[in-house]
Image (tube, rainbow, N blue to C red):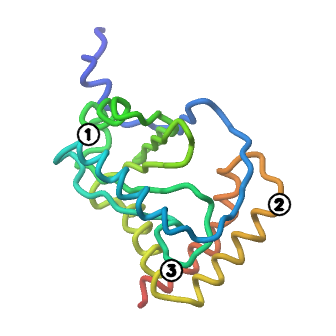
Amino acid sequence: MTDPSPARRRRADVTTTELVGGVERRTIAIAVPDAAWSATFAEHRDRIAAALGPVARSIEHIGSTSVPGLAAKPIIDLLVTVEDITAEEDYLAPLLDAGYVMRVREPGHRLVRTPRLDVHVHILEVGAQAAEDYLILRDRLRRSPEDRALYEGVKRALAARDWPDMNAYADAKTAVIEEIKSRGRGS
């Protein structure tokens, strides 16, 4: 039996999560809102748009830094949607050439980031539920002072704890995120 072509191997979707570089212990620090977050987003939006052209179907600012007035980890999160997440040859090399480094490869999701670890770029397929969920959460937090205060309080309480890595901290926020998204879907 012959191996599939290299292009075919690149297009095959992954079935497990690959955390490039392994688990990283990082300090979780919540910062006061910073007007520079919007400018950093715009800089990376333009950088990604130049690298990907029409392959990037949308580029959105997501996460806490996208919500005015919300304290956050000073990490800018971007959501990039592509037509086919398994077609890494369409987007991964151009992003790596633009200075991002691979961090996560998992079913339906890729994540590249800056070497300084201050920008995370989530790549999802157009129409993916996870992409919609990011926008629902962001938009609800932008509209609801009560949910913004709730989320910030939970983040501050969790940041005060010791975590083996940032993923464990993120997982601990799941319940409140689901609660806020539920209200976002209803409003």
List x then y, in percent, for residue 106: 47, 41
Q: Which dot marks residue 141?
A: 3
Q: Amino acid at mark 1?
A: Ala
Distance CA(mark 2)–CA(mark 3): 24 Å
Label 3, secondary structure: give it.
Answer: helix
Q: Quadrant of the N terminus?
A: top left
- N-terminal label among 1 and 2: 1
Q: Amino acid at mark 3?
A: Leu
Left or right for 151, reference 36: right
- N-terminal label among 1 and 3: 1
Q: Nearer the viewer, residue 81 or 27?
A: 27
Left or right for 20, reference 110: right
Q: Nearer the viewer, residue 92 or 46?
A: 46
The residue furthest top is: 1
Residue topped by disc 1: 51
Q: Is residue 5 above or below residue 96?
A: above
Distance CA(mark 1)–CA(mark 3): 30 Å
